[in-house]
């Protein structure tokens, strides 16, 4: 009896074990729970209907639960269908036995689903801000996901959900500013954290990829951090400006070919506004074609064109909020010269630091008369900052080429490139004329000292003598400059020694100046500028050796000897000047030689182009106003010929002169000195008297027309001026 009982119990136990094993490994299919599961889902979300197939039940004896799953289900949401590969959930056996069916956890594996549909499905459970934003930016694409949802006893979904899957062929559009197409990625989503891996996408037709992007939510902000890689690609200006945010937009960029590696961090608020942008980029620019219209470097680097083609350009960009930090190097026009630079943008202020090893390119500094030829190596350092429409501040400009050194310290320009401040400069170089320039400027409070061994002032003197209105280099400059210079060149041959004096600027203009120096032949030269009580600027120049100054004028050749006095009074842009030269001679004055030839006075003309004609006196009274020089009177007297002339010269446009030329001045002077006979020959009325030559010179400065009347009686004006000079002498 006991054996039979044992056998029966063993059989029952075996059957139970077999049933458990069968239910654990094979399970059973039934439609019994379809209605219950659908009703539970409907209870969770009334918008969702669930169309289920057969449900398979697998027993899990270890935790006394049953795994319920179904394949090929369909979720109906507002007439949209979502195809489900399978749905799984675990329920307690107790609830299954007593028909108290409840879902603690729901696992859903989808078939490929349109992104719009899955976002709509997710929003039906929880209409969060992130899902709303995702719905707004998503245009196309499909998703396959494994979804794990947990519910409390009341059927509400808990926050510890997990969603894994991948997205294929998605298109996103962020406020019509950023377009992402052909997006493929894997994702892992949990509460307030999104991990995105293996990203491939086209952003404005540029191929990008990313191994990892992390999105975290804190309150109403989404913080995005990731690494983005771009493949090498050519694109034009419009593509470039669409691709990059406003801080890198550049209307001067024509074409770019680059690849990049970018570490990106930013946040987005609920209004889809980007904030706290932080980007660290390494960019390989194989080609950058850009318009050079920000700073005209052509006068300094002649090899540069208006369109600059940079090649093999390496960039490191750090952008943090409104602060942009760029480091890179540039190859200049295939010449294998590199510019290493660093630029930091902080709000609207740019700080720059450049280092250039210049060998293959020429370098010109016109105002210093300096030229670095090709194949001579030079080191250039430039440090400073600037604000848009607010000028440049150069902390340091340094040039080193062989034994040549040029440097500036704290050189500040306004937006019109006028100097606002300079702390000093140091010149030690040979210029284009092979003249040594060794000069030092030092600042002491608001005043300056210039001292040195030698300096070539040829260009500066040319500007002064040509009345160049652009000579002013300063803006708002009020300083005193003390000058001490051993040698100053005034042209390629001539120089002066022991130049000393002071120069005062007031309201950006020369207020007073006093310079003294001597020529190598011990002849003196003094130059002064004073401002009187009437605010008139009085300029005086005296020299015992005027030849180096006169030789600058092409129409006079072979000037020798003499004394020169120059006096000018200037006020309100109008200057009145008297120039006097005594006891000089000239060998060649082509214009006057032509006049004498036309007047059949060939002997004097030959003398003028041969050994030279001596003059005892020369005076010229003239005024200048806005490029117009009006000659009130130019008078020269000598033993062989005298000249009286007036007229005007409109700078680079028109010359109009007229005058009288009288040969044998000594004879006329002798006749005029006889009291009775002088009155008869000279006469008392205009147009009467001794013969002379009248002339007119008029036309373009490069094409002057000359007319001569070889027989004309002298005017009283001419005779009066001659007698004044005779009496003076």
Image (cartoon, grey):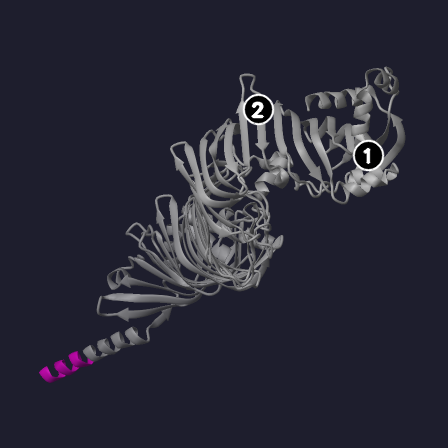
Q: Is residue 276 above or below residue 378?
A: above
Residues 257 and 211: in front is 257
Q: Circle 2 sits on which residue?
A: 537
**Magenta stretch encompasses residue 689:** no
| 4 magenta-colored | yes
**In the image, residue 456 lies at what x, y percent?**
54, 45
Q: Is residue 369 left or right of residue 22?
A: right
Query: What's drawn in magenta, residue-wise?
Result: 1-11
Tell me what residue is drawn at x 77 percent, y 44 percent: 609
In the shown orientation, is residue 724 left or right of residue 693?
left
**Mark closer to the chain start, 1 or 2:** 2
Do we see residue 704 in this rendering? no
Residue hosting label 1: 698
Residue in the foreground of this view, choosing between 392 and 281 = 392
User: How many residues crowd around disc 2 within 10 Å: few (fewer than 14), some, or many (20 or more)?
Assistant: some
Quadrant containing the C terminus is top right
Q: Quadrant of residue 63?
A: bottom left
Which structural element holds mark 2?
A: strand
């Amino acid at each position: 009896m006991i054996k039979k009982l044992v056998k029966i119990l063993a059989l029952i136990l075996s059957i139970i074990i077999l049933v458990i094993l069968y239910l654990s490994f094979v399970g059973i299919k039934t439609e019994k729970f379809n209605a219950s599961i659908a009703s539970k889902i409907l209870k969770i979300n009334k918008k969702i209907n669930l169309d289920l197939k057969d449900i398979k039940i697998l027993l899990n004896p270890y935790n006394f639960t049953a795994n319920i799953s179904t394949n090929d289900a369909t979720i109906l949401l507002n007439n949209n269908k979502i195809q489900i590969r399978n749905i799984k959930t675990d329920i307690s056996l107790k609830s299954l036995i007593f028909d108290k069916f409840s879902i603690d956890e729901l696992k859903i594996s989808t078939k490929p689903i349109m992104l719009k549909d899955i976002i709509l499905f997710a929003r039906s459970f929880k209409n969060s801000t992130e899902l709303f934003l995702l719905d707004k930016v998503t245009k196309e694409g499909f998703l396959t996901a494994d979804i794990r949802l947990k519910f409390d006893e009341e059927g509400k979904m808990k926050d510890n959900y997990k969603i894994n899957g991948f997205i294929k062929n998605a298109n996103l559009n962020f406020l019509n500013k950023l377009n992402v197409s052909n997006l493929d990625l894997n994702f892992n989503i949990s509460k307030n954290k999104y991990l995105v891996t293996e990203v491939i996408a086209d952003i404005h037709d540029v191929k990008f990829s990313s191994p990892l992007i992390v999105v975290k939510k804190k309150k109403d902000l989404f913080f995005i951090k990731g690494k983005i890689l771009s493949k090498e690609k050519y694109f034009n200006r419009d593509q470039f400006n669409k691709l990059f945010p406003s801080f890198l937009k550049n209307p001067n960029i024509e074409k770019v070919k680059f690849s990049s590696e970018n570490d990106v961090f930013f946040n987005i608020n609920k209004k889809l506004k980007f904030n706290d942008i932080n980007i660290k980029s390494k960019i390989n620019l194989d080609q950058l074609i850009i318009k050079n219209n920000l700073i005209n470097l052509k006068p300094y680097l002649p090899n540069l064109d208006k369109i600059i083609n940079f090649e093999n350009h390496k960039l490191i960009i750090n952008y943090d909020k409104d602060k942009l930090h760029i480091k890179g190097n540039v190859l200049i026009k295939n010449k294998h010269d590199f510019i290493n630079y660093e630029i930091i943008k902080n709000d609207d202020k740019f700080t720059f630091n450049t280092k250039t090893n210049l060998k293959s390119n020429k370098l010109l500094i016109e105002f210093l008369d300096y030229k670095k030829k090709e194949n001579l190596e030079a080191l250039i350092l430039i440090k400073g900052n600037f604000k848009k429409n607010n000028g440049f501040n150069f902390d340091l400009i340094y040039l080193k080429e062989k034994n040549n050194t040029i440097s500036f310290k704290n050189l500040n320009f306004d937006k019109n490139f006028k100097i606002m401040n300079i702390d000093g400069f140091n010149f030690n170089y040979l210029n284009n004329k092979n003249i040594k320039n060794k000069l030092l400027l030092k600042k002491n409070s608001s005043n300056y000292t210039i001292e040195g061994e030698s300096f070539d002032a040829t260009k500066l003197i040319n500007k002064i003598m040509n009345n160049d209105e652009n000579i002013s280099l300063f803006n708002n400059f009020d300083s005193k400059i003390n000058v001490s210079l051993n040698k100053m060149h005034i042209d390629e041959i001539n120089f002066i020694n022991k130049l000393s004096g002071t120069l005062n600027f007031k309201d950006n203009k020369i207020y007073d100046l006093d310079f003294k120096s001597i020529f190598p032949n011990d002849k003196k030269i003094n130059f002064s500028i004073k401002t009187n009580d009437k605010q008139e600027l009085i300029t005086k120049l005296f020299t015992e050796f005027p030849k180096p100054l006169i030789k600058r004028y092409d129409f006079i050749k072979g000037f020798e000897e003499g004394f020169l006095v120059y006096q000018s009074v200037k006020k309100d842009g109008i200057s009145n000047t008297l120039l006097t030269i005594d006891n000089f001679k000239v060998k060649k004055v082509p214009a006057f030689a032509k006049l004498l030839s036309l007047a059949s006075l060939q002997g004097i003309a030959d003398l003028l182009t041969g050994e030279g004609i001596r003059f005892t006196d020369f005076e010229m009274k003239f005024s200048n106003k806005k490029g117009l020089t009006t000659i009130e009177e130019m008078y020269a007297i000598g033993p062989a010929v005298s000249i009286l002339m007036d007229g005007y010269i409109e700078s680079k446009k028109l010359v109009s002169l007229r005058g009288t030329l009288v040969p044998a001045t000594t004879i006329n002077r002798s006749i005029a000195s006889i009291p009775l006979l002088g009155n008869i020959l000279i006469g008392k009325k205009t147009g009467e008297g001794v013969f002379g030559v009248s002339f007119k010179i008029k036309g373009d400065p490069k094409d002057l027309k000359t007319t001569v009347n070889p027989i004309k009686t002298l005017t009283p004006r001419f005779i009066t001026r001659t007698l004044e000079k005779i009496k003076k002498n």
